[in-house]
Amino acid sequence: MNGRPTIQHWVPRFYLKQFATEETRGTSNPKVWVINKDDSPSEPELVTTRRICGQRFLYTPEGSDGRRDWSLEEYFSGLESGAAEYWEALSSLQLDLSEPEVRSRVAEFLAALHLRNKFVFDLCKGIMEKRDALFGRPRPIQKIAGEEVNDDRPDLTNPGKIFAQSTRDGIPRIKKLFESYRWMILKCEKNVLTTSDVPVTFIDSIPRRSGPGSKDAKAVFPVSPSTLLCMVPREGQPETLCGEVDCAFFQDVNQAIENYAERFVVLGTKDAANQWFQDKLNRTPKA
């Protein structure tokens, strides 16, 4: 594959590294404490960032000629490289998010992070499978004699291409929404925040049904174990606020992140992982 990644991570490894253990964060193989929601209750497990939030050829759909389209993977790689350059400044509240160009770069990264998720791919695939079961499989796009085939046309038989195209189409719209929100960067003195396999979490009155299209849905994004970005819809010009908060507020945010996660909850420290596990045991009804 000419050095190209075959396992493609929908949660970037450079981001997961922010939550790695202190002794592994600076190594080439960072490790994080993970809770698996599929196991009830699940004891915290220390795993490398290579092992979670990745899927083979997630962003590189295969065409009818057997060749893979690497353009979306290359686009995401560029976004990650750019984000890695400003991440420390963002985490330490040193990034000037009032600058439109800076805000735009962060909003684009977050919009892509929201849409590139494996579970969006699974949703696309599931809808196509139900369609096929009810109505039969549509015919693949075929070239008509003398016609120039437009490669941008959706291939209704290929879930990978549908996922890739819908992701490309959706990023500018969600980026624009995020840019219009009020942003709040909140800092806590302790590393208590968690993240997950769905790191952009939406909070609304209807749990698990919120998204950027939901009315008044707030978005939270853990930048690091001690820094949180909140995005709130508002009328008028967007603005950015910064401040310090009590760690108890972050614990409430952690509950929302856990509820929104599909499978993996990522915790920054062993103490946090053990505390999470103990709290889970206390919340589990006894038989």
Image (cartoon, rainbow, N blue to C red):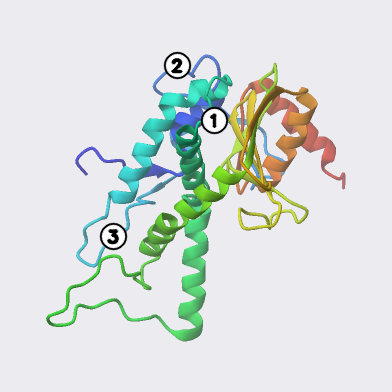
The quarter holding residue 264 reads top right
Q: Quadrant of the N terminus?
A: top left
Measure how far apart labels 2 and 1 are at the Cα level. 27 Å
Find out whether the residues at labels 3 and 2 contact each other: C-beta distance under 8 Å. no
Q: Residue furthest top?
A: 23
Measure how far apart labels 1 and 3 are at the Cα level. 38 Å
Q: Where residue 97 is drawn, which disc sits there?
A: 1
Query: What residue appears at the point 83 percent right and 40 percent down from the top-left corner?
Result: 283
Q: Where residue 26 is drawn, which disc sits there?
A: 2
Disc 1 residue crowd, few under 14, some 14–19, many 20+, Cα 10 Å: many
Measure how far apart labels 3 and 2 are at the Cα level. 36 Å
Q: Residue furthest bottom?
A: 135
Residue 107 coordinates in the image, percent (x, y): 51, 41
**Would residue 48 be visible to someone looking at this image?**
no
Amino acid at circle 1: Leu
Residue 103 coordinates in the image, percent (x, y): 51, 35
The quarter holding residue 183 reads top right
Q: Earlier in the sequence, mark 2 or mark 1?
A: 2
